Image (cartoon, helix red, strand yellow):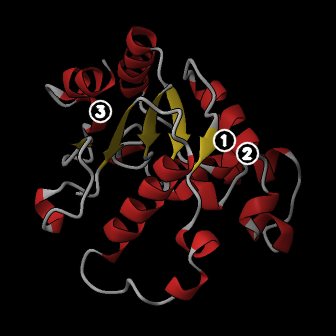
Amino acid sequence: MKVIFLDNDGVICLAENWGSRYKKSRKYMIDNNIPDDDITMHDHAKRPVLIRFDNFDPKAIKVLNKVLEETGAEIVVSSDWKLYATVEELGDYYESQGIAKRPIDRTLNLDEFDPDSAGLYHWKGWKERMRILEIKKYLEDHPEITHWVAIDDLNMSHEAHQGAGLENFVLTPRSYEGIKQSGIKQKLIKYLS
């Protein structure tokens, strides 16, 4: 099995798309005569999934779809978006945005498999370290994975974490370009081949 551990923000949801969920939410409220003070619309999980998240970049989707097509890889969501939707809801959203495959799963949150971890990773790089541990746990629990790559705008490389990072990692350092950056597609395909 081949897997892409996929982050969304800074990878396929680019900086120019950030905040689009607010516009979609506002339009939904107007179209459905929902008053501004309706507290249920302020509860993220109660909003329809199609307005809950920012839009993906169409060109970034094309690159991701090409990688999925060429490698046969599956998507496992490692993004923080997993905190705000089920895998099924994320699949619906991915489809609505034009991604060729629905995610098959998500990584566990660190506190789901290490309850003593709460509050431990609040130093510089804590978010990266948490995500590294979550991906490593997923790999440990799924020995059927033969090829994998993690793509993220957070630097989770071996070099950035003194050898404790991820071996199969591709960084997208420019949030306006994400997966569209030159050479990214080739790096992903190399890890998945």
Q: Is residue 149 above or below residue 71?
A: below
* Identity of the residue drawn at 57% across and 21% down: 98
The amino acid marked with disc number 2 is: Val
The amino acid marked with disc number 1 is: Leu
Report if residue 128 is visible in the image.
yes
Of badges 2 and 1, nearer the viewer stands 1
Numbered circle sitting on residue 190: none
Q: Is residue 50 above or below residue 61?
A: below
- Neighbour tally class for label 1: few under 14, some 14-19, many 20 plus, Cα within 10 Å: many
Dot 2 falls on a residue whose secondary structure is helix
* Identity of the residue drawn at 33% across and 42% down: 151
Q: CA distance from mark 1 to mark 3?
A: 19 Å
Numbered circle sitting on residue 49: 2
- List the residue tagged with mark 3: 179
* Residue lying farthest to the front in this orientation: 143
* Identity of the residue drawn at 38% across and 34% down: 148
Q: Which of the two residues, 110 or 65, is positioned nearer the viewer here?
A: 110
Describe residue 171's horizontal placement relative to residue 133 as left or right. left
- Is there a contact, CB below 8 Å, between mark 2 and mark 1? yes
Mark sitting earlier along the chain (2/3): 2
Where in the figure is residue 158, as x and y percent of width and height? 17, 56
- List the residue tagged with mark 1: 90
The amino acid marked with disc number 3 is: Ile
Q: Which of the two residues, 37 or 130, is positioned nearer the viewer here?
A: 130
- Neighbour tally class for label 3: few under 14, some 14-19, many 20 plus, Cα within 10 Å: many
**Picture mark count:** 3
- The quarter in which the C terminus is drawn is top left
Dot 3 falls on a residue whose secondary structure is helix
* Identity of the residue drawn at 28% across and 20% down: 189
